[in-house]
Image (spheres, helix red, strand yellow):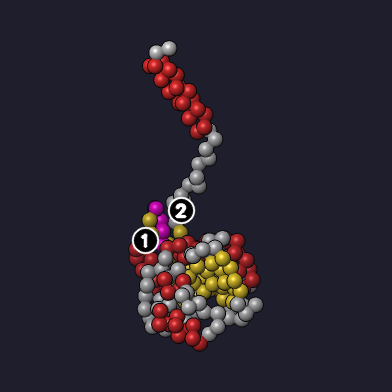
Amino acid sequence: MPSTSLWTRRRVFGAAAAGASVGLVRPGQALSFAPRSVSLYNIHTGEWLRTVYWADGHYIREAVKDINWILRDHYSNAVRPMNAGVLDVIGMLRARLDSRQPIQVVCGYRTPATNAMLYAEHRGVARNSYHIDGMAIDLRVEGRDLTQVHRAALSLRAGGVGYYPRSDFVHVDCGPVRQWSYGA
């Protein structure tokens, strides 16, 4: 057989195999363009915010700026951009709890100085906390038992979850999936 006809047969068989295998590939999860929103109440400042922070495939700059202000270090008023992943975690948590109540923020961003002070004064504070990087929030949800909030956060498998019943909050972050309890 001439090499050109053999090459053509290989192409035909290859194309047939590729076509058949396409049916075996499952598409990945489609990116949702549904708006994402949060409702936050900072227990230390008394400030409250309800906003859509993501719509039409992008983050809304002014909404994110307002969120960063609510989640600022309440000791120093320092603001840092919060990681978008932690915003999504709290949005998913609120949806999982099927709650219309705002997330009560116990702690959002912490400056390194604030974190060092809390680390020195309180047990259960991490020396290199994700709060310093704007990747963590300590929270509770009005109308929901802390154990419900804890279980719902764990079920998301979206990052770290710490359970602090004596201090009356659940820690969530967008770091690696892990869990711990302090004071249970």
Where residue 157 appears, x then y in whole percent? 56, 60
Q: Where on the picture, by quarter, is residue 143?
A: bottom right
The kind of residue tagged 1 is Ile
Q: Residue at x 44, y 56 (%)?
A: 35
Q: Residue at x 49, y 65 (%)?
A: 175
Q: Assess disc 1: are there few (<14), some (14-19) or many (≥20) residues with their C-alpha within 10 Å of its C-alpha.
A: some
Cα distance in 3D space between marks 2 and 1:
13 Å
Give the residue furthest to the top.
1
- On screen, residue 83 above or below 74: above
Where residue 17 appears, x then y in whole percent? 50, 27
Quadrant in which the C terminus is drawn: bottom right
Q: Nearer the viewer, residue 72 or 55?
A: 72
What element does badge 1 sit on?
loop
- On screen, residue 31 above or below 20: below
The kind of residue tagged 2 is Ala
* Residue 58 shows in this picture: yes
Q: Nearer the viewer, residue 176 or 32?
A: 176
Where residue 60 appears, x then y in whole percent? 37, 61
Mark 2 sits on what residue? 34
* Residue 40 shows in this picture: no
